[in-house]
Amino acid sequence: MSADQIIITGIRGTGHHGVFDHERRDGQEFAVDLVLHLAPSDAAHSDDLADTVDYGTVSQLVHDRITGDPVALIERLAELIAGDVLGIAGVTSVEVTVHKPQAPIPVPFDNVALRITRP
């Protein structure tokens, strides 16, 4: 039996993450997609927010991490976000994708993304 999922895409904010001085100084937009795997709950029957994971709360947590203290690598940012989300009751595992569309790459590109899954 597969777990229920909450999928949130495109949580955006300006962060000052990166290894280069200009990234830390100027900042750039980051976007995060999440797939939350949920423990079985009564939410479908109770129709009560208290019986599920509040995706508004999750989104705010992620936004705060994007716009918060800078880190050098998106791998670290993804790991911190995963830890935050896994601390929410009812989340059994999470897939985090961090997008860095303005990464300092010397050729034309659309996006750089890192995806991690944590139990």
Image: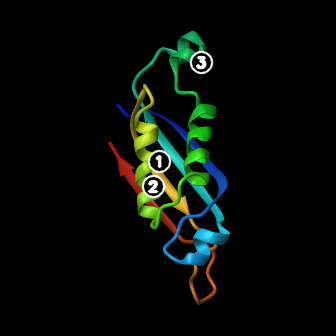
- Residue type at mark 3 is Leu
Q: Which residue is mark 1?
A: 81
Q: How far across and down, in percent of the image, does residue 26 sit?
A: 67, 70
The Cα–Cα distance between marks 1 and 2, rounded to whole angstroms, is 5 Å
Q: Which residue is mark 2?
A: 78
Q: Nearer the viewer, mark 3 or mark 1?
A: 1
**10 Å crowding of disc 2: few (<14), some (14-19), many (20+):** many
Q: Residue at x 59, y 45 (%)?
A: 64
Earlier sequence position, callout 3 versus callout 1: 3
Q: Nearer the viewer, mark 2 or mark 3?
A: 2
> Number of labelled discs?
3
Q: Relative to 43, is 102 above or below?
A: below
Regarding residue 101, the answer to whether it shows in the image is no
Q: Relative to 5, is 23 above or below?
A: below
Q: Which mark is residue 49?
A: 3
The Cα–Cα distance between marks 2 and 3, rounded to whole angstroms, is 26 Å
**10 Å crowding of disc 3: few (<14), some (14-19), many (20+):** few
Q: How far across and down, in percent of the image, does residue 17 sit?
A: 54, 65
Q: Relative to 6, is 79 above or below?
A: below
Regarding residue 100, the answer to whether it shows in the image is yes
Kind of element beneath mark 2 = helix
Q: Residue at x 61, y 49 (%)?
A: 9
Kind of element beneath mark 3 = helix
- Residue type at mark 1 is Ile
Where is residue 112, by image quadrant? bottom right
The Cα–Cα distance between marks 3 and 1, rounded to whole angstroms, is 22 Å
Earlier sequence position, callout 2 versus callout 3: 3
Q: Could you say which is closer to the camera, residue 47 or residue 57?
A: 57
- Residue type at mark 2 is Ala
Mark 1 touches mark 2? (CB < 8 Å): yes
Q: Residue at x 47, y 47 (%)?
A: 81
